């Protein structure tokens, strides 16, 4: 199932969910809060959902599917869709499927204080993944949600209003201060643990792992610790040795895309105090530079490793896990367009990646979009299953980031022609960006995680 078809399938189930909640709880407002696992976490605005009520929602939604009703919609000039079903109308970014009968695979899971609408596994269209409560991920989302409520921000328009009143600098400072506070708190936990020799930082593509690792290292030094950085990106195999996915594209998200024997040998040598020559990978040519970087780690230093596979236990099986501190970083964007229309964290990361690939990796937007489906499959297989193993999670999203990225991203997306197989994706990303008023990026701090994608970072790219 393609990414576009997945979006249509999910959009159709969301329409059914809205109608079911309207019937079961006529005096309540459904809030689609955020993506979690292969689903959406939802709440009622003024009430807690019981396990019995979650089951009723599932039963009524299944009845709605079995009725095999038509879902009609109109494509508006602004590339949004007016969807009509059960005597109500919802404006959506993605079109739904034409009938409800094909929406056979879903599940409603009670997850206090709300519930999760679980979709089919992204890699297996007719399979619902076993539900393992994502306690740490949910807690990270909830923490961000409380922060937004404290600032009286609930949707994109609230941020646009701040930008319109020339108060965007206050917004930027608040968002960046939250990041700094959280990074400092994580550094304090590492300091208190004492026996940590290796910090493992993982997260999906374009989550800001590199800048996070550098900012964390700064805070560790403030605490009197001595961090030494090692990037997994430098251990990529040469392009011709990279494994390919089922469609024949290079699978950069596969663990086997890394030189695992060399990495394991280097980690063991570093822990023992030996000197190594780490490779340096050139993403433009797809090969390592002829010479690497000499490196060693003394007994009072901490190794900081970042990369998408850092939490995978197969990465370095000989590493002593009792001496590790695991961090999961992801851009959990939480400002919604309205109560029913959320901004996908996946789309936020894709927009980040489009801008970064063009600026730093010599990859045009056509190639970035072509690779994205493979990236997503790799994340579902190799990254997300290990996120709950993290000691702590860090949300790298910034309230203002789509406002700041919009000008560059729009320029790149407008280069995708109607003949491209990725034109629909480009149109939908442009539609999403249209909700965000542009922001002057000159006031974005040079150590911001956002600088990793749009340039001007204090840190070496």
Image (cartoon, rainbow, N blue to C red):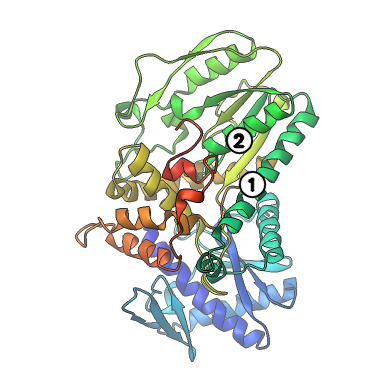
Q: Position of residue 418 (x, y in %)?
A: 21, 62
Nearer to the camera, 201 or 255: 201
Q: Which residue is mark 2?
A: 215
- Farthest residue to the front: give it: 166
**Residue 123 seen anywhere in this rendered image of the structure:** no
Against 306, residue 112 (above or below) is: below
**Residue holding disc 1:** 179
Cα–Cα span, label 1 and label 2: 10 Å
Dot 1: element: helix
Rendering coords of residue 416 (x, y %) = 25, 56
Q: Is residue 273 visible?
A: yes
Q: Position of residue 294 (x, y in %)?
A: 49, 12
Q: Is residue 317 above or below residue 123?
A: above
Q: Badge 2 local density, few (<14 within 10 Å), some, or many (20+)?
A: many
The residue shown at (40%, 67%) is 434
The reply to whether the C-beta atoms of the residues labelled 1 and 2 are less than 8 Å apart is yes
Crowding at mark 1 (Cα within 10 Å: few <14, some 14-19, many 20+): many
Q: Where does the N terminus fall, quadrant-wise? A: bottom left
Left or right for 231, reference 423: right
Residue most extreme to the top: 274
Q: Residue at x 31, y 53 (%)?
A: 412
Residue drawn 25% across the image and 55% down it = 415
Mark 2 secondary-structure assignment:
helix
Classify 369 as above or below 84: above
Residue 113 point in image, percent of width and height: 73, 67
Q: How many marks?
A: 2
Q: Is residue 360 left or right of residue 63?
A: left
Reading the chain from its start, which is encountered first: label 1 or label 2?
A: 1
In the displayed structure image, the side of residue 86 where residue 418 appears, left or right: left
**Residue 326, image quadrant:** top right
């Amino acid at each position: 199932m393609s990414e576009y078809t997945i979006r249509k399938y999910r959009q159709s189930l969301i329409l059914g969910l809205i109608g079911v909640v309207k019937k079961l709880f006529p005096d309540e407002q459904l809030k689609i809060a955020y993506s979690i696992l292969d689903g959406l976490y939802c709440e009622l605005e003024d009430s807690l959902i019981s396990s019995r009520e979650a089951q009723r929602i599932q039963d009524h939604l299944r009845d709605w599917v079995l009725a095999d009703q038509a879902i009609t919609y109109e494509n508006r000039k602004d590339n949004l869709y007016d969807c009509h079903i059960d005597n109500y109308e919802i404006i959506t970014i993605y079109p739904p499927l034409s009938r409800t009968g094909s929406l056979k695979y879903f599940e409603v899971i009670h997850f206090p204080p709300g519930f999760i609408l679980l979709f089919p596994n992204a890699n297996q269209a007719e399979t619902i993944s076993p539900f393992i409560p994502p306690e740490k991920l949910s807690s990270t989302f909830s923490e961000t949600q409380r922060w937004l409520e404290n600032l009286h921000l609930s949707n994109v328009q609230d941020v646009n209003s701040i930008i319109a009143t020339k108060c965007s600098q206050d917004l930027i400072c608040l968002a960046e201060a939250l990041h700094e506070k959280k990074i400092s708190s994580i550094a304090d936990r590492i300091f208190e643990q004492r026996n940590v020799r290796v910090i493992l930082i993982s997260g999906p593509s374009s989550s800001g792992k590199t800048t996070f690792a550098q900012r964390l290292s700064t805070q560790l030094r403030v605490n009197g610790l001595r961090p030494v950085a090692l990037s997994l990106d430098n251990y990529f195999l040469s392009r011709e040795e990279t494994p390919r996915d089922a469609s024949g594209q290079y699978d950069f998200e596969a663990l086997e895309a890394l030189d695992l024997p060399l990495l394991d040998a280097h980690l063991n040598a570093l822990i023992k105090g030996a000197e190594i020559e780490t490779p340096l990978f050139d993403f433009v040519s797809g090969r390592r530079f002829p010479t690497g970087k000499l490196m060693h780690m003394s007994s009072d230093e901490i190794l900081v490793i970042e990369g998408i596979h850092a939490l995978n236990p197969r990465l370095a099986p000989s590493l002593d896990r009792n001496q590790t501190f695991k961090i999961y970083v992801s851009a959990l964007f939480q400002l919604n367009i309205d109560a029913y229309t959320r901004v996908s964290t996946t789309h936020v990361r894709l927009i980040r990646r489009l801008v970064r690939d063009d600026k730093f990796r010599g990859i045009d937007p056509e190639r970035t979009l072509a690779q994205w489906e493979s990236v997503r499959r790799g994340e579902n297989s190799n990254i997300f299953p290990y996120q709950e193993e993290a000691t702590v999670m860090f949300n790298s999203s910034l309230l203002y980031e789509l406002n700041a990225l919009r000008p560059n991203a729009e320029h790149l997306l407008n280069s995708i022609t109607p003949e491209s197989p990725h034109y629909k994706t480009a149109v939908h990303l442009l539609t999403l960006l249209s909700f965000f008023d542009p922001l002057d990026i000159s006031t974005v701090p040079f150590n911001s995680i956002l600088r990793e994608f749009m340039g001007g970072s204090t840190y070496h790219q």
